[in-house]
């Protein structure tokens, strides 16, 4: 008659005290957290790098835009294309949106006071055929008191004007960190420069008797 093998007490004790495989289990617990932290670090570093590069690109483009031959629509389109190309070299899926506004002096640029209008409905916006004083003569009501864009005869401003040049950039996160922390997949950056246009001619003056127009 055969006898069943019995576990020896010292074998059970050895099994209870064994640490074999503990390192693998600990690594399996810690690894996901470590990977997420590393992805977050790399993504944040890339965002900071993009911000620094955008500021540098904007400063150069803004300085170039103050030159006389760059105040035309064609010249500004060239500058915008250059900055867009260089941003996309760092983030190929980026959306780049440059804008310009110009003012007569730094005080106006800082204040951004809207052109006066008759706010009949009290919504603090010129609309519904409300009348406004077209101080800068560009034919539209400017909520920030500035001028620029397709409605202006000089999109980048005239001589000695203060130009606010802003570039907004958005692109998907470099790493899918947003999935783990519940944020948006899009990184949004912007940079702004305020410079004075070179006095290649005398600064023009707004009309002494500005027109009264109506908002749509």
Image: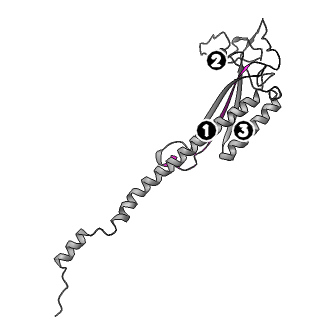
Residue visible at 73% across and 29% down?
A: 63
**Residue 111 located left or right of residue 150:** left
Q: Which residue is mark 3?
A: 83
**Residue 121 located left or right of residue 129:** left
Quadrant for the N terminus, please.
bottom left
Mark pair 2, 3: CA separation? 26 Å
Q: Is residue 132 above or below residue 82?
A: above
Horizontal and vertical percent position of residue 139:
77, 17
Horizontal and vertical percent position of residue 175:
55, 50
Q: Is residue 133 above or below residue 183?
A: above
Instruction: Choose the circle earlier in sequence order: 2 or 1.
Output: 1
In the rendered image, residue 176 lying in the magenta stretch gets the answer yes
| Label 2 CA crowd tier, 10 Å (few <14, some 14–19, many 20+) | some
Q: Which residue is mark 2?
A: 112
Instruction: Choose the circle earlier in sequence order: 2 or 3.
Output: 3
The span picked out in magenta is 161-179
Mark 2 element type: loop
Q: Nearer the viewer, residue 185 or 212?
A: 185
Quadrant for the C terminus, please.
top right
Q: Nearer the viewer, residue 97 or 130?
A: 97
In the rendered image, residue 105 lying in the magenta stretch gets the answer no
**Residue 45 located left or right of residue 16:** right
Please give the count of numbered marks on the rendered protein. 3
Mark pair 1, 3: CA separation? 14 Å
Mark 3 element type: helix
Q: Which residue is mark 1?
A: 52
Query: Residue 26's image quarter?
Result: bottom left
Circle nearer the viewer, 2 or 1 = 1
| Label 1 CA crowd tier, 10 Å (few <14, some 14–19, many 20+) | few
């Amino acid at each position: 008659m055969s006898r069943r093998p019995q576990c020896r007490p010292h074998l059970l004790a050895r099994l209870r005290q064994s640490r074999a495989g503990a390192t693998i289990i600990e690594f399996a617990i810690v690894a996901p957290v470590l990977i997420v932290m590393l992805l977050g670090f790399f993504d944040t570093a890339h965002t900071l790098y993009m911000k620094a590069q955008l500021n540098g690109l904007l400063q150069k483009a803004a300085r170039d835009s103050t030159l006389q031959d760059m105040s035309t629509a064609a010249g500004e389109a060239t500058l915008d294309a250059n900055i867009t190309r260089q941003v996309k070299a760092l983030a190929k899926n980026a959306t780049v949106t440059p804008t310009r506004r110009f003012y007569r002096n730094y005080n106006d640029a800082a204040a951004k006071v809207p052109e006066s209008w008759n706010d009949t409905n009290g919504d603090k916006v010129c609309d519904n055929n409300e009348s406004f004083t077209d101080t800068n003569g560009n034919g539209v009501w400017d909520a920030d008191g500035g001028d620029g864009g397709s409605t202006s005869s000089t999109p980048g401003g005239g001589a000695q004007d203060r130009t606010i040049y802003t570039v907004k950039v958005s692109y998907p996160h470099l790493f899918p960190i947003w999935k783990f922390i519940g944020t948006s997949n899009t990184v949004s950056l912007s940079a702004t420069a305020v410079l004075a246009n070179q006095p290649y001619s005398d600064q023009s003056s707004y009309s002494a008797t500005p027109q009264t127009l109506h908002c749509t």
